[in-house]
Image: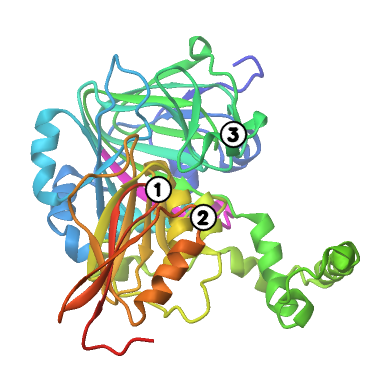
Amino acid sequence: MSDGWPLTVTAPGPAREDASALASLVHPLDPGTFRAAYWQRRPLHVQGPPDRFHDLFTMADLREAISRQRELGLLIRVSGDRDGDGGGAGAHVPVEAADVAARLRDGASICVEPIERAAPRVASLAARLRHELGHHGDAGVKCYLSPHGYGFNTHFDAHVVTTLQLAGHKRWRLSRTPGVPFPRGNAFADADGNVRYIGRAPSSVRPWERPEIAEETFAEVLLGPGDVLCLPAGTWHSAKAVGHSLAVNIAFAPVDVLALLTNAVRTRLEERQAWRSGLPASGEAAGFLLDRREELIDELRALALDDDLLSAAAPAHVPAAAQASAPAPVTAAAPVSAGTAATRMAALARPTGVPEIDDRGLQCVLTVANAEVAAEWYRRVLGCRVLAAIPEFGWMELTSPMPGVSIGLSEIPTAGVAGGAVLDFRVDDLERTRELLDRDAATPPARMRAVAGVARFLEAYDIDGNRLMFFQPDDQGRT
């Protein structure tokens, strides 16, 4: 590379047996050099001994993990990106374990997460690397299985991508520097070469978030068994299998520093009536905001920058053995990465009186044009809150007003389905429900009808054209 730091280094042999996890991974570099010259700065490809990951995670381990999808709460998705096509790196489809073999035969890459639940050795490695790097954010792990020519088209991620090639080969093309240093979300290059962010409306993307994509300047590396590739957040890359490829990806997500600091003072400020009252009349609003600004500055200056604050940035970790054996619901998803739009959505307040619902026995999946916008509508109108999100897949999972039921929002180019499943909610006051729907300017008009002696119904739609139904039985008192 022109700055003197090579993209590829080759290990002459295995690291010392007593080497730390990080030292073994970046050998022949020492960890200090890696942290100072590469970590979050520039890509690094380490050609390692071909057998160094032979007992970390195997195809047999992957088959067992997929067979235990429901027990472990694993999310399995497929991508049709392949050599010769363009765009598409944002379209990933969830599938069940029984569908995986057929998808592979038809041509698709398989992504399974969080794979550490099925792999104690992988979970242990991720935890040790996180500790040795001094990383305060989350470290989640995915497994990728790709047939020849398949993988992912040009995109970048909002986290550090650390890929360990376990078997087969994969060809990567990557920018030598981040296209967007520390981006606010994941993005891909569409078929026309435009930058598209997952889960965000184009109007929300700022100029500095739209870099030019000069793929003719990209470097190319071929990963083989034992190789490691570490990319800073925001680094453009594409990856396609050569023959076949099995790899695990440890994603180091950044901490949302703005949220960390504001959340630290939020509780104290919310105890004060002025912070809960909203804005006063227009003539008094400027002075009111000036007073709140000074209070906020005072609280931030008084904030103790100690271990308690740092611990708030650390994700809650379950011991690897427990992760590998504890049952989890099938709809469980990877932890929400700090700094994503989904994290901001999860922090939005629920309307007063909406119950806390965490039971996810049944999930109703709807197709939407923009998962973040749709999630905000469901929060605003139905009081739902975000349970989990995977921004790179355009996926969000929400509570619903019904115990035992969650709502999945899957972002695809053509949202809305004519016919199909309908979310049908029983309510105590149908008139009040209609009033709330009509009050929301973005909500299509609802239609009331009745079946004498049975119930009254309110036929409605969400902002993506998905059908909703609200009903009040006739034996229920009316107001």
Decide whether residue 348 is among the magenta residues. no
> Looking at the rendered structure, which numbered label has been put on residue 441?
2
Along the horizontal axis of the image, is 307 left or right of 122? right
Whole-Å distance between the Cαs marked 3 and 1?
24 Å
**x then y, percent, for residue 304:** 77, 72
SS for tag 1?
loop
Disc 2 marks which amino acid? Ala
Displayed quadrant of residue 258: bottom right
Residue 317 visible (yes or no): no
Residue span colored magenta: 130-144
Q: Residues within 10 Å of mark 3 (few under 14, many from 20)?
A: some
Residue at label 1?
A: 17
SS for tag 2?
loop
Disc 3 marks which amino acid? Tyr
In the depicted view, which residue is nearer to us: 467 or 107?
467
Residue at label 3?
A: 38
In the depicted view, which residue is nearer to us: 354 or 422?
422
Q: Classify 458 as above or below 180.
A: below
